[in-house]
């Protein structure tokens, strides 16, 4: 079992104080083509508008992958049992950041939400991509990613993921 820990902070008089902690206990899976295909589909099947900020919801109504690239990519990054995947980011034709994973050993691009481009006759901005650090304070995992990961692994025969806060 693996664990993702996400602290919530509050600024004190002289330092940041942890006020809440979210923990996801989940199962990593082998980095192979079968798991990539299975988990890519499971991630896509669990992308819902509650995982989006308001600015992405209107276009997402007609383009269901739009706005989901960050948490979908981060979920895949944590699910796959490998240290060769690197998060990449680039601006697309409308100036929005798009996220995906690239294998640093062979250049393989793993883009769970690339259909947001292909379905409207566009290409993802992979040719402009650069390695990127995850967004967020102290590089912590996003809560939306943790929720998505729990949904993806819920009901699998081998494991029941647990997301709890304290």
Image (spheres, rainbow, N blue to C red):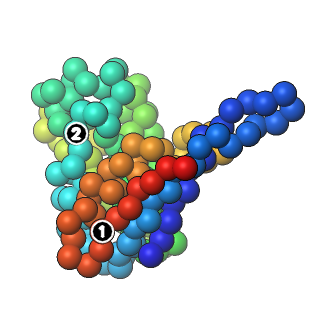
Dot 2 crowding, Cα within 10 Å, few <14, some 14–19, many 20+: some
Residue pointed to by mark 1: 160
Percent position (x, y) of residue 16?
75, 37
Instruction: Please tell me whether mark 2 sits on a helix, a strand or a loop.
Output: loop
The tag on residue 55 is: none
The residue furthest right is: 14
Displayed quadrant of residue 109: bottom left
Q: Write the residue at 44% across / 75% down.
A: 1
- Could you say whether the residue bearing mark 1 is in a helix, strand or loop? loop
Q: Position of residue 37 (x, y in %)?
A: 21, 67
Q: Nearer the viewer, residue 27 or 101?
A: 27
Disc 2 + disc 1, Cβ < 8 Å: no
Residue at position x 50%, y 66% from top? 3
Residue in the image at 78% along x and 30% along y: 12
**Residue bearing mark 2:** 48
Callout in the foreground (2, 1) = 1
Would residue 136 appear left or right of 116 to someone viewing this image?
right
The image shows residue 74 at horizontal and vertical percentages of 42, 53
Quadrant of the image occupied by residue 55? top left
Tell me where residue 150 sits by quadrant.
bottom left
Residue 156 place in picture, x, y as percent: 21, 70
The image shows residue 121, relative to residue 145, as above or below, that is: above
In the image, 55 versus 5, the foreground residue is 5
Mark 2 or 1 closer to N-term? Answer: 2
């Amino acid at each position: 079992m693996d664990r993702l820990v996400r602290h919530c902070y509050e600024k004190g008089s002289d330092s940041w104080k942890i006020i809440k902690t979210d923990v996801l206990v989940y199962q990593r899976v082998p980095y192979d083509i079968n798991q990539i295909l299975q988990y890519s589909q499971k991630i896509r099947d669990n992308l819902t508008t509650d995982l989006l900020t308001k600015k992405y919801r209107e276009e997402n109504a007609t383009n269901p992958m739009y706005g989901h690239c960050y948490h979908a990519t981060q979920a895949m990054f944590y699910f796959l049992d490998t240290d060769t995947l690197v998060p990449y980011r680039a601006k697309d034709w409308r100036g929005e950041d798009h996220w995906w994973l690239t294998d640093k050993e062979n250049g393989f691009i793993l883009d769970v939400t690339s259909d947001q481009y292909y379905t409207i006759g566009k290409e993802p901005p992979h040719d402009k991509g650069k390695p990127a650090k995850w967004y967020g304070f102290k590089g912590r995992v996003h809560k939306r990613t943790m929720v998505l990961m729990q949904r993806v692994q819920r009901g699998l025969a081998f494991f029941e993921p647990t997301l709890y806060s304290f």
